Amino acid sequence: MKFFIDTANLDQIREANDLGILDGVTTNPSLMAKEGVKGEKEIFQRYADICDIVKGGSVSAEVFATDYEGMLREGEVLAAINPQITVKLPCTKDGIKAVKYFSSKGVATNCTLVFSVGQALLAAKAGATYVSPFVGRLDDICSDGVGLVADIVSVFRTYGYKTQVLAASIRHTQHIIECLHAGADVATCPLSAILGLLNHPLTDKGLATFVKDAEKMK
Ligand code: G3P
């Protein structure tokens, strides 16, 4: 399973990248706004900086437009920033048409805001590189986010769709483990959830003992 980090914060992206396990980055308008990025110039510069940190990795840049023509206009500009850019498009009627447009041109796409197998199917048929089911937001409404990831993985494998299942809206470390078991191709996670994978009290206890015993041999 590939690891993407779900943030537009450069320090967090650098920290995850320095771990040597990062395959890409996803952003969305909310994550960009959270960083105080404003105006086209700053937005494009932020994407360029992110691509520079995660060299060779996929960087999802989401369009702001909700109409087909607007999505094509914005998507073309975003894709021109760097070949690492994956154009992120919402799973709407216009969004699916835009996925088809970009995938036909060989531009990588991430179809986002996916909450059902049916939406994932349309994205895959339109040729999306990634489809992003939102795990946490389904859990928020007492639905089964990881269950949706597993269902999409199963349908894509049955029918041989090449679209990768990118588990999004990951809120904590256990979500990552569950998505791993569900067969997700990618999980995009906050830094805290990624670092949480390292935590084990027996590791801390064992290391403390090794350090103490190593002292005896000095
Ligand atoms: O990748 C999508 C993600 O950013 C949404 O996460 O926590 O706002 O549901 P959240």
Image (cartoon, rainbow, N blue to C red):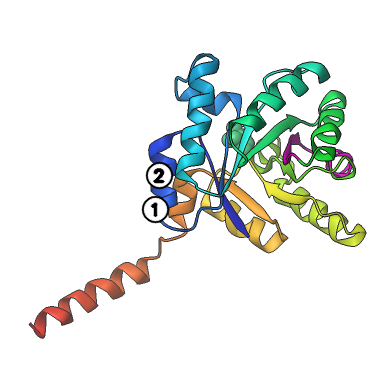
In the image, 210 versus 96, the foreground residue is 96
- Which residue is at 75% across, 22% downward? 71
Report the residue marked by disc 1: 18
- Mark 2 within 8 Å of ligand 1, using the beta carbon: no
Task: Answer whether residue 33 is visible to the viewer in this image.
Answer: no
Amino acid type of the residue that numbered disc 2 sits on in the rendered structure:
Arg
- Which residue is at 79% across, 34% downward? 102
How far apart marks 1 and 2 lie (CA) works out to: 6 Å
Quadrant placement of the N terminus: bottom right
Looking at this view, name the residue that lies furthest to the left: 218
Residue 193's disc number: none
- 218 to the left or right of 174: left
| Contact flag, marks 1 and 2 (Cβ < 8 Å) | yes
The relative height of residue 202 versus residue 134 in the rendered view (above or below) is below
Instruction: Name the spot of residue 88 as percent of width and height, x first.
Output: 69, 33
Quadrant placement of the C terminus: bottom left
Report the residue marked by disc 2: 14
In the image, 99 versus 106, the foreground residue is 106
| Residue stretch rendered in magenta on the structure | 107-123
Amino acid type of the residue that numbered disc 1 sits on in the rendered structure:
Asp
Q: Secondary structure at mark 1?
A: helix
- 158 to the left or right of 206: right
Instruction: Name the spot of residue 167 as percent of width and height, x first.
Output: 67, 47
Task: Answer whether residue 160 is visible to the viewer in this image.
Answer: yes
Instruction: Name the spot of residue 148 as percent of width and height, x first.
Output: 77, 48
Q: Residue 40 colored magenta?
A: no
Q: Secondary structure at mark 2?
A: helix
- 115 to the left or right of 171: right
The image quadrant where one finds ligand 1 is: top right
